[in-house]
Amino acid sequence: MVNIYDSLRNENGDMVTGRTKLFILSTEEDGTIRDFLSGYAIVPETQGYMFITDEYVVEQIDKLQFKDGVLSVKDGEELIPPVKTEKELQREALLKQLAELDSQPAE
């Protein structure tokens, strides 16, 4: 399954790490993605299809297909999410705590 998001930002307007834009320029007849752009700040100058997805999806683009307006994983393939280190998990937890503190009204 390919996670597709509405925005690069969270509900507080902050950039979400690990998300990126994927712009599909062209595909093969079988739906294999031939040409694409990716990144936070891409500005396509042609027609195509834009998705906001996880960064690791772009690294595994050969496992995807785009058919009938739907971005999906090819039959027999599987997207493998990156394994987070203990340090990364701790950092995410601390950042979440900071965001919660920042959202509380001042006393």
Image: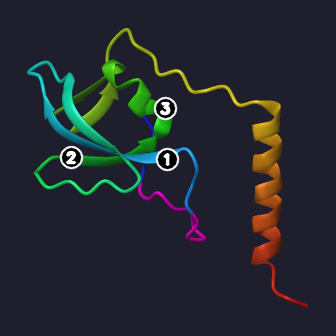
Q: Is residue 76 left or right of residue 92?
A: left
**Magenta-tinted stretch:** 6-14
- Quadrant, the N terminus: top left
Image check: 5 left or right of 47?
A: right
Q: Give residue 44's quadrant in the image.
A: bottom left
Mark 1 or 2, nearer chain start: 1
Q: Is residue 52 above or below residue 99?
A: above
Give how far across and how far down residue 12 sits, in percent. Answer: 60, 71
Q: Are marks 2 and 3 in contact (CB under 8 Å)?
A: no
* Dot 1 alpha-carbon crowd within 10 angstroms: few under 14, some 14 to 19, many 20 or more: many
Query: Amino acid under label 2?
Result: Tyr
In the rendering, which numbered label is found on residue 49?
A: 2
- Tell me where residue 71 appears, x and y as whole percent: 29, 34
Which SS class for mark 2? strand
Magenta-colored stretch includes residue 11: yes
Element type where label 3 sits in the image = helix
Question: Alpha carbon of mark 2 to alpha carbon of mark 3: how far?
Answer: 18 Å
Indicate which label's residue lies in the foreground, 2 or 3: 3
Residue 83 among magenta residues: no
Q: Taking 43 as reference, is 105 left or right?
A: right
Residue at (49, 32) in percent of width and height: 56
Front residue of this view, candidates 67 and 44: 44
Q: Earlier in the sequence, mark 1 or mark 3?
A: 1
Whether residue 86 appears in this view of the structure is yes
Q: Quadrant of residue 84?
A: top right
- Front-most of residues 104 and 60: 60
The answer to whether residue 6 is left or right of residue 102 is left
Residue behind mark 1: 19
